[in-house]
Image (cartoon, rainbow, N blue to C red):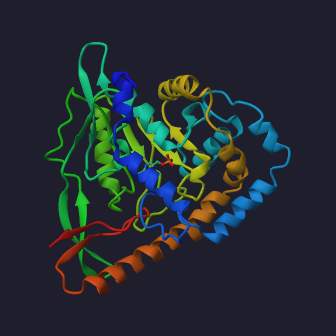
Amino acid sequence: MILSKFGQKMTQKSGILQLMDDLGTALTADKPINMLGGGNPAVIPAVNDIFQQAFEQLGSDFLNSAGNYSTPQGDKAFIEALADFLNRHYHWGVSAANIALTNGSQNAFFYLFNLFSGEYADGTNKKILLPLAPEYIGYADVHTQGQHFVASKPLIEDVDYQGQSGFYKYRVDFDRLVVDDSIGAICCSRPTNPTGNVLTDDEMYHLARLAEDNGIPFIVDNAYGMPFPNILFTNATLSWNPNMIMCLSLSKIGLPGLRTGIIVADEPVIHAVSALNAIVNLSPTRFGAAITTKLIKNDMLKTLSDRYIQPFYRQKADYAIALLKKALGDTPMKIHCPEGAIFPYELCPK
Ligand code: PLP
């Protein structure tokens, strides 16, 4: 089989292909498996019960959704409920015109990175700036031509966690960060996969300013952040402005199979994403929207996140740390301060 350059690039071995293959294969293994890797969310019975009930109560709404395409922008009722939710809780002043859905947020990053980097009409080539590395492995191979990332090494600061020493935290090294004409957008995940780092409000403010001053968007991957799944163990606020492209997902609340990603952005970005949706997917999937629209309207998704999801992962993080410390004994090591997300925490030699 002879493939185009695009075909060759997209079918080569990639980290994310290997990871997702491993996760899927593990699920069908005939031996009991402890899912310790990847971003697959855990089963949390109290949360799953609510999703099961929401599914059973769908009634005729099921066929209204499953039996019809939405517009390329996504399910209207869900988008309106979400705009109302975001204004009620965060006063963002957004309307339905600021929200588009995608088939998972991975799908959103494929669109966004190809929209804001690569070759431009004036002949320039632009890159996505990751202001703090390590970053999410799933970004690595999404470009249709070449690789278009530039990453910046973090500062490493010793910190305490719950009164214990032996932890560190990554911080953006603003002195090293260069934003010039070769940068098409700034992007970060917050909380970060894989380190569990949460960029501080101050760092977010500075990154947002940098992006705005340079006339480029600031893409925020909020897959683990507020308001759902809210897997945050540190104080952080969630803000948005029209220069930000905020990406959310229904995956980490426990519904990854429904492939529902959400983009909150200025209207031209929403138009661009909708146009891509039409070409790539006709319209995004509606099942996640069907299950969760009521749960957004009555704040249940937020309540589940605050009451069950966040404490569940916090407890797991503390347990993982206790196990690590016990198992590694006096081995010199430091652990990245667990500030959020769902990962076994990064270690570095002391
Ligand atoms: N962003 C981060 C940081 C992730 O860890 C993941 C998945 O693991 C995603 C985005 C993509 O998730 P989804 O496409 O299921 O929304």
Q: Which quadrant holds residue 307? A: bottom right
Vertical placement of residue 111 versus 288, above or below? above
Give the left or right position of residue 98, taking residue 21 as reference. right
Image quarter in which the C terminus is found: bottom left
Number of numbered markers = 0
Q: Nearest the camera: 241 or 269?
A: 269
Residue at the extreme top? 122
Residue at the extreme front? 1
Vertical placement of residue 332 versus 185, above or below? below
Relative image position of residue 80 (x, y in whole percent): 67, 39
Q: Which quadrant holds residue 22? A: bottom left
Q: Is residue 241 visible?
A: no
Q: Nearest the camera: 236 or 162?
A: 162
Relative image position of residue 176 (x, y in whole percent): 14, 45
Q: Is residue 140 visible?
A: yes
Give the left or right position of residue 93, taking residue 337 as reference. right
Residue at x 50% of width, y 69% of height: 33
Residue at x 40% of width, y 25% of height: 1
Relative image position of residue 246 (x, y in whole percent): 46, 42
Residue at x 66% of width, y 52% of height: 296
Residue at the extreme right? 60
Q: Nearest the camera: 130 or 251?
A: 251
Q: Nearest the camera: 158 or 149?
A: 149
Relative image position of residue 340 (x, y in whole percent): 41, 64
